[in-house]
Image (tube, rainbow, N blue to C red):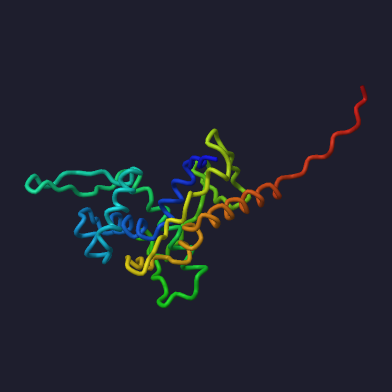
């Protein structure tokens, strides 16, 4: 039996369920890092790991290559609109770890909204009406690309070995959830079940009078 093709959900989980991908994207968004050497120096990452992650992120449209030197010929990694939009994902992950994970060696530093100066926490809301949206307020449906089977990454993206880079230690508990293919399947399945249970039950049809 052949492998089931991944849909967009699985591809997205494969990207954000990897600590190095998140660390690279965070540096690019928050610190404006673009060049290979800068990523390597600031992350302490092995060349092979960094090369593989930058290639994957570029293929996924998070970065685009821009040449900045002719001799030698060198390129830098520039965030696309797709890449900059991952800022929302980073904020959500950071907020979840700050609230629900208490065993960090050092607590995650709080974030503050520059507009009002208060501590910041993202709130999910509807773009159309502006109202907050909880788990029972949103309904999702599968399109032509299939259901949960195709929404699971083919393999765990966190691959560590004794001789490789140990990982940046960025939001590790969240990565244990979204970076594991079985957790990636279980969490949306549970959310789907909660939505189904929240729907009002229809009364059974009466007997036919024909």
Query: For the view shown, which residue lies furthest in the bottom direction?
Result: 105
Residue 11 vs residue 97, the one in the foreground:
11
Q: Is residue 45 left or right of residue 90?
A: left
Query: For the view shown, which residue lies furthest in the top direction?
Result: 210
In which quadrant of the rendered image does the N terminus lie?
Answer: top right
Q: What residue lies at 51% left-to-right and 52% top-to-bottom?
A: 124
Query: For the view shown, which residue lies furthest in the front direction?
Result: 1
Query: For the view shown, which residue lies furthest in the left direction?
Result: 71
Give percent across and percent down for residue 85. Answer: 37, 48
Residue 106 vs residue 184, the one in the foreground:
184
Q: What residue lies at 44% left-to-right and 66% top-to-bottom?
A: 172
Give percent across and percent down for residue 57. Answer: 33, 48
Give percent across and percent down for residue 128. Answer: 51, 40
In which quadrant of the rendered image does the C terminus lie?
Answer: top right
Q: Is residue 149 left or right of residue 51?
A: right
Q: What residue lies at 28% left-to-right and 63% top-to-bottom?
A: 45
Q: Is residue 22 left or right of residue 150?
A: left
Give percent across and percent down for residue 42. Answer: 24, 65
**Up-down relation of residue 103 to residue 145 (above or below):** below
């Amino acid at each position: 039996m052949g492998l089931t093709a991944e849909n967009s959900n699985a591809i997205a989980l494969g990207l954000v369920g990897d600590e190095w991908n998140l660390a690279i994207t965070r540096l690019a968004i928050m610190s404006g890092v673009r060049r290979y050497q800068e990523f390597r120096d600031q992350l302490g990452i092995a060349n092979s790991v960094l090369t593989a992650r930058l290639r994957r992120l570029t293929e996924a449209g998070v970065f685009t290559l821009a040449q900045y030197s002719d001799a030698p010929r060198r390129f830098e990694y520039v965030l696309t609109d797709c890449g900059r939009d991952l800022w929302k994902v980073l904020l959500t992950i950071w907020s979840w770890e700050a609230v629900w994970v208490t065993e960090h060696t050092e607590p995650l530093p709080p974030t503050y909204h520059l507009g009002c100066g208060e501590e910041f926490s993202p709130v999910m809301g509807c773009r159309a009406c502006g109202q907050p949206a909880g788990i029972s307020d949103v309904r999702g449906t599968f399109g032509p690309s299939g259901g949960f089977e195709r929404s699971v990454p083919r393999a765990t993206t966190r691959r560590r070995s004794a001789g490789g880079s140990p990982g940046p230690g960025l939001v590790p508990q969240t990565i244990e959830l979204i970076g594991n293919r079985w957790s990636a399947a279980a969490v949306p399945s549970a959310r789907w079940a909660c939505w189904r249970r929240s729907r009002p039950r229809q009364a059974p049809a009466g007997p036919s009078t024909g």
